[in-house]
């Protein structure tokens, strides 16, 4: 990542470049050196003007790494991709960090291979769920889950956790983190209550904004989206912690203003902190799925809250919208979704979206708006411009000793210590030096379960 926007769009491969995909030379100008262009809107417009419909639609589609190949990336030019739960590079969940970086380079090379004619080449970006550290990757630091971090009462510590996580993400060449979760859990039966900092929306807002700043840097600072920083995502908009009887992906019912006064509170604060992306929720609000809820995605999020960033879907969430399937859902795009997270059906969805533009179901202006938001994010994150580099050539990339390094583990241990909550102490704490302690139960030897309260 790099901070700032270039005065000229600079280095993205132009069609017809002779450079081999693995070349380390700067990428060529995709804007043909827009005279005096320092405005990101001019840069975005210049790129869109040279892109085909098929390439614009590809920017709106996000498959997962184990469902497509580099050859497919070279052909379709997906705008982004993700690693799903238990998914690792080349099908290996426990692959070493070097393999994650190798795949990042491979997809970068495929997405920046020259195109015929004058069409600009737009690098793909990789998103990951590093929700309590970069824990999909072996040796990464594990931090306590949000429910424990909220108990610390220390947003500055959470800011440090964000910075440590961002650095470890950069080690593997990944660009984008699907975090923080800013759900306001109101019913402990909800299966992801551990993802909520608090049942108090003001506490959630404060901690969510702190993690955004830790991941991205402070808005306006020199290191914003620069070295040691990655793109953040506030999720899931909105109401995922308030479903009836705690049913995951369920219904949230009630007066809309009353619901907003609880579940929407963290979002303006995250937006003020500069969060670049927001993820739509699986749940419904008064019977309407969020992935197809134009009144909330556009009317509230963009209209009332003034969010100008990118709205990304959750795992096949668009397929839950009435009248949709995972491979056919104009409704979500029309409602305000910018990127479809479609793990395994990217080609079929691409085909249907292109057809729906051509038959008038989806206006071309909406495609340009959504694709423009993707391009704008890539400009802000330094993925397009004179300093854009292959993942392995960026700061922190390949420095595998930074995964789980001592300073990061020290932050994790501090978070663990501060998150301990004891209702009554009858001489149990502090533990006596040399004492024999029995650790029992199903979580006794489970990192996944113990991570809610323990840092590694």
Image (spheres, rainbow, N blue to C red):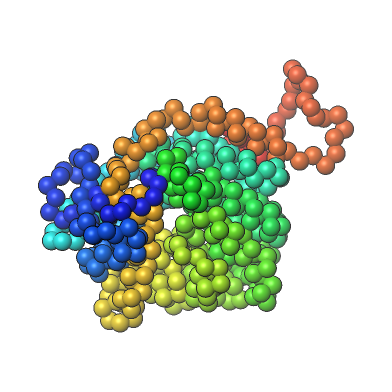
Expressed as whole percent of the image width and height from the top left, the position of residue 308 reads: 46, 65
Residue shown at 23% from the left, 65% from the top: 51
Location of the N terminus (image quadrant):
top left
Task: Evaluate whether residue 36 shows in this view.
Answer: yes
- The image quarter containing residue 75 is bottom left
- The image quarter containing residue 447 is top right
Expressed as whole percent of the image width and height from the top left, the position of residue 63 reads: 36, 56
Residue shown at 20% from the left, 50% from the top: 28
Q: Is residue 189 left or right of residue 125?
A: right
Q: Is residue 231 left or right of residue 436?
A: left
Q: Closest to the observer: 245 or 165?
A: 165
Question: Quick check: 87 above or below 426?
Answer: below
- The image quarter containing residue 329 is bottom left
Q: Closest to the observer: 352 or 372?
A: 372
Question: Quick check: 160 above or below 232?
Answer: above
Expressed as whole percent of the image width and height from the top left, the position of residue 354 reads: 28, 72
- The residue most toward the right is 426
Expressed as whole percent of the image width and height from the top left, the position of residue 390 reads: 29, 42
Q: Closest to the observer: 255 or 26?
A: 26
- The residue most toward the bottom is 360
Q: Closest to the observer: 92 or 228?
A: 228
Question: Quick check: 328 above or below 451?
Answer: below
- The residue most toward the front is 36
Residue shown at 52% from the left, 37% from the top: 164
Q: How many marks?
A: 0
- The residue most toward the top is 434
Location of the C terminus (image quadrant):
top right
Residue shown at 30% from the left, 44% from the top: 387
Task: Evaluate whether residue 297 shows in this view.
Answer: no
């Amino acid at each position: 990542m790099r901070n700032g926007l270039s005065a000229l769009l600079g280095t993205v491969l132009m069609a017809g470049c002779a450079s081999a995909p693995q070349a380390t030379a700067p990428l060529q100008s995709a804007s043909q050196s827009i005279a005096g262009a320092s405005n990101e809107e001019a840069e975005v417009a210049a790129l869109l003007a040279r892109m085909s419909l098929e390439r614009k639609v590809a920017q709106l589609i996000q498959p997962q790494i184990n469902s497509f190949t580099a050859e497919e990336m070279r052909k379709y030019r997906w705008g982004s991709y993700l690693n799903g739960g238990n998914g690792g590079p080349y099908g290996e969940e426990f692959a070493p960090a070097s393999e994650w970086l190798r795949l990042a380079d491979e997809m970068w090379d495929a997405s920046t291979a020259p195109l015929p004619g004058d069409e600009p080449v737009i690098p793909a970006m990789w998103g990951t769920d590093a929700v309590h550290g970069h824990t999909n990757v072996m040796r990464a630091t594990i931090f306590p889950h949000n429910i424990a971090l909220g108990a610390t009462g220390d947003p500055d510590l959470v800011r440090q956790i964000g910075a440590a996580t961002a650095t470890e993400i950069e080690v593997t060449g990944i660009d984008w983190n699907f975090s923080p979760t800013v759900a306001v859990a109101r019913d402990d039966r909800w299966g992801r209550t551990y993802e909520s900092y608090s049942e108090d929306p003001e506490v959630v807002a404060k901690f969510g904004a702190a993690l955004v700043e830790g991941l991205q840097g402070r808005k306006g600072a020199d290191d914003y989206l620069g070295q040691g920083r990655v793109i953040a995502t506030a999720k899931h908009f909105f109401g995922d912690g308030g479903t009836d009887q705690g049913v995951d992906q369920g219904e949230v019912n009630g007066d809309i203003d009353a619901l907003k006064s609880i579940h929407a509170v963290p979002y303006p604060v995250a937006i003020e902190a500069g969060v670049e992306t927001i993820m739509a929720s699986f749940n419904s609000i008064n019977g309407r799925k969020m992935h197809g809820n134009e009144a909330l995605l556009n009317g509230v999020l963009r209209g009332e809250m003034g969010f100008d960033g990118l709205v990304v879907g959750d795992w096949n969430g668009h397929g839950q919208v009435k009248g949709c399937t995972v491979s056919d859902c104009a409704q979500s795009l029309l409602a305000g979704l910018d990127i479809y997270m479609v793990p395994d059906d990217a080609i079929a969805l691409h085909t249907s979206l292109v057809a729906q533009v051509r038959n008038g179901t989806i206006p071309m202006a909406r495609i340009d708006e959504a694709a423009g938001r993707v391009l704008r994010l890539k400009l802000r994150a330094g993925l397009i411009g004179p300093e854009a580099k292959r993942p392995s050539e960026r700061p922190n990339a390949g420095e595998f000793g930074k995964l789980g390094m001592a300073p990061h583990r020290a932050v994790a241990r501090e978070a663990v210590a501060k998150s301990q909550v004891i209702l009554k102490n009858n001489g149990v704490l502090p533990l006596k030096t040399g004492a024999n302690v029995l650790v029992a139960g199903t979580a006794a030897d489970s990192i996944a379960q113990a991570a809610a309260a323990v840092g590694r």
